[in-house]
Every structure is written in structure tokens, then in C-alpha cells.
Image (cartoon, rainbow, N blue to C red):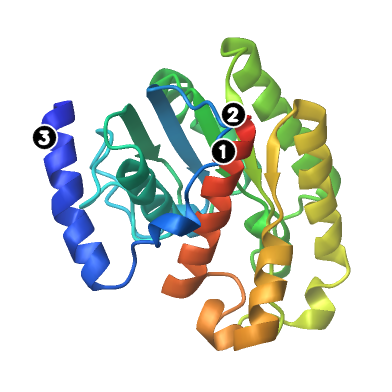
Amino acid sequence: MSTSASRRSFFKQTAVLSAAGMVLPACESTPPKQAQIPDRLRILFQGDSITDANRDRSSIQSNDFLKGMGNGYALLAASNLLIDYPTTDWHTYNRGVSGDKVFQLSDRWEKDCLDLQPDVLSVHIGVNDFWHTLTDSYEGTVETYEKDFLKLLERTQSNFPKIKLIIGEPFVVLGGTAIDTEAWIPTFRAYQKAAADIATQMGATFIPYQQVFDTAVADQGVAYWCPDGVHPSLAGSALMAKAWIEALHKAYV
């Protein structure tokens, strides 16, 4: 798809998103003056179902806002960026896959990351690495998660030394319908700490999604932001998108 065609598709989709209340107010995503984001970028969103968000996996071109970006935070973040930066030559991709754990990212990394040659790689992964130990007899541990995640990012950075890494903290919203608090806490907190430690080691920008949701839920309640405690609502996805855009700006300060 040509850049002009993809932008026509984007603005058509934006009208739909705006009508649905999914476009963030411009003031919410206005970048700080010191952020120097290039005019040409390839941005890749990676992760599990929270990133996947029901995308059409048959769509492989960039900036497919009608099918390929899903209906979650990746779509909202990318669409709002193109509103704020209408003259840029940016290409965004969503390659999240529902149910994935870190080792499954690794299995498809050549095709779904390295071949796309991203300038910005955003990864939100970790919920299934823990959750599936409770539901699917998965035997991985937090040490498995940390080792595999670090190895994956080191592999990526060795191929693209200048890449900007953004790591979204895996989160759980306690009180969600799918969450047994005693089963999740405190064990899941170790996975969150591992993600934060990896971000520090790799020089990545870290998004503290747990804090973002804890703050929001205190004001409006679980059902509004993330009903099952894992998969965000439309409002929760917008919340994630806002935090993601702020992280991109920080990455280019």
C-alpha cells in the first residue's frame, strides 16, 4: 500500500474512531518540545492478546488501520500519532498474537520482527508467562521469563544497534472477573519486577502500566477500565495508548 493510500485509509478510519470516542484529545498527546522524533520511522507493536486485540492477521502491510492494527491500544496509539504528526513517513505494524508467551515470540521473531527492520520496538508480554502456569500446565518460571525476554531483546539489539525499545509492564487489575487474587499475588509481582529490570539493562523506556491502571481503577472502578482484570476495555485501551505515546516521546528526548 502506498503512503498516500494508507493515509487516506487512516483518515477514513479516524472519522469512525472519532465518532466512537476513541481518538484521544490532541492536548493529551502533545509531545514535549525537547522530543526529537524522526520524520521516518518503522514502529512495531509486539505482544500477546492485549496487543493483538483481534487484528486481522492476513493483513501484513503497514498502517492498515481498518484491519491490521486490531482494536486496542496499538491502534489508538498509532492513529493518534498520525494526527499529531501528519507530514511524517511513519509505518506502524501490529504483530501481537493472542496467547503468546516470550518463547513463542522468539519462535516467530525473524518474520514478525527482524524482517520488518523496526526503528521502534514495543513489547508488552508476560501475563501469559504467569497465567498459563495456573490454567494450562505451563511449567515456565519467572527465571524462564526473564532469561528468554532478555535474550530476545539482545538478539534484536545486535541486529539493530540504534533501535528504540519500549517495554510495557505486564499488569493485572485485581477485582477483575478472571482474577483470583490469592493465586496471582505476590507471585506475579516478580514478573513485573523482571520486566522493569530488563528495561533498565537494555536501556529501554518502561511503561508502568500497573500504576496507570491502579490509579484509574481507584477513581472509576475495575469494570470500566478492565472488566476481566487482564484485557482492557475501550477506555482501558485508550489509557494504555496515552501512556505509550508518552513513552515514545521519552525515548526520543
Please state which amino acid type lies under the numbered disc 1.
His
Q: Nearer the viewer, residue 73 or 98?
A: 73
Please, is residue 207 above or below residue 223 in the view?
above
- Residue hosting label 3: 5
Residue 188: where, in percent of width, then height? 80, 63
Q: Nearer the viewer, residue 71 or 125?
A: 71
Please state which amino acid type lies under the numbered disc 3.
Ala
Answer with left or right where residue 195 lies relative to residue 95. right
**Inter-mark Cα distance, 1 to 2:** 5 Å
Answer with left or right where residue 119 lies relative to residue 129. left
Q: Nearer the viewer, residue 169 or 127?
A: 169
Please, is residue 201 above or below residue 194 in the view?
above
**Inter-mark Cα distance, 2 to 3:** 28 Å
**Inter-mark Cα distance, 1 to 3:** 27 Å
Give the class, few, some or many, for how many residues have Cα within 10 Å of label 1's Cα (few <14, many ≥20). some
Q: Quadrant of residue 174?
A: bottom right
